[in-house]
Image (cartoon, rainbow, N blue to C red):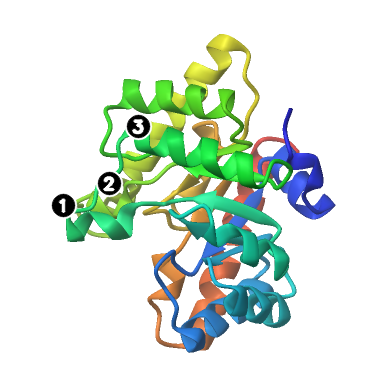
Amino acid sequence: MTSLNHLPASVQKGLDQKTLLKVISGLNNFDKSNVERVALAAGRGGADLLDVACDPDLVELAIKISGLPVCVSAVKPLLFIEAVQAGATMIEIGNFDSFYPHGRFFDADEVLELTKETRALLPEVPLSVTVPHILSLDRQSQLALDLVSVGADLIQTEGGTSARPLSPGSLGLIEKASPALAATHTIRAAFVEVGCNTPILCASGLSAVTVPMAIASGASGVGVGSAINKLDNDLEMVAAVRRLSESIALSQLARGL
């Protein structure tokens, strides 16, 4: 039984129409000033969902500034409780990209146990779980199926921080997104094979160039972080979100929706 029906209608619609845009400030980003700027850009730029670190104060700030539903990300399930009490709409285990440079890796068994623990604590809160990209693609797809079986409502990809683009321009942006795109395609194929319709959010390493590819690969939406939260200028941040939103809209038109 999915908990996605507890999401706001706008988020459900985005998933159903495969147009959801989630702006990510960062699982380990507790800089209130930066989160405030990201939240403002997400709200003004046309995002559907804002993802912040799992902290009640950040949740309240993000809701106030963005006017958007807020998802919180963490790898410690107990942290989710206060964040939900503060107004978080969705909870997410991962993503894990920020841990890898410090030598912290999450294997399939650990992610599965974190999911079980989280679902036991908050059985009716919409739950997204990231599949670690350090796993081979076939193991990623199997883990995704296992996560759904223990209560994950949405599966998210990762991998952009480990990509090493060799080319400039659009080709380099495609190379940057390739791990997340490959994971999305592989997981969606595994879901189709068993008749699973759990949404997939393609995240990590995406840009306005590659979000249509993510949707074409089987994603119901996209998550974008560093392409926005690393910018220094507030106007540039808003413009970046708008470009992403417009890219998704053009993709929708191309599909005849």
**Residue at image mark 3:** 108
**Comparing labels 2 and 3, the label whose residue is closer to the camera:** 3
Do callouts 2 and 1 mark residues in contact (Cβ within 8 Å)?
yes
Do callouts 3 and 1 mark residues in contact (Cβ within 8 Å)?
no
Residue 197, image x, y percentages: 65, 24
Q: Residue furthest top?
A: 193
Do callouts 2 and 3 mark residues in contact (Cβ within 8 Å)?
no
Q: Report the label total.
A: 3
Between residue 138 and residue 231, name the one nearer to us. 138
Residue 114 showing in the rendered view: yes
Quadrant of the rendering where the C terminus is positioned = top right
**Residue at image mark 2:** 175
Q: Earlier in the sequence, mark 3 or mark 1?
A: 3
**Residue at image mark 1:** 166
Quick one: SS at disc 3?
Answer: helix
Distance Cα–Cα, label 3 vs label 1: 30 Å
**Comparing labels 3 and 1, the label whose residue is closer to the camera:** 3
Q: Is residue 255 above or below residue 162?
A: above
Residue at 41%, 67% in the rendered image: 227
Query: Residue 231, located in which quarter of the rendered image?
Result: bottom left
Q: Earlier in the sequence, mark 2 or mark 3?
A: 3
Q: Earlier in the sequence, mark 2 or mark 1?
A: 1
Instruction: Residue type at mark 2: give it.
Output: Glu
Instruction: Residue type at mark 1: give it.
Output: Leu
Between residue 98 and residue 78, name the one nearer to us. 78
Residue at 54%, 56% in the rendered image: 78
Mark 1 closeness class: few <14, some 14–19, many ≥20 residues within 10 Å: few
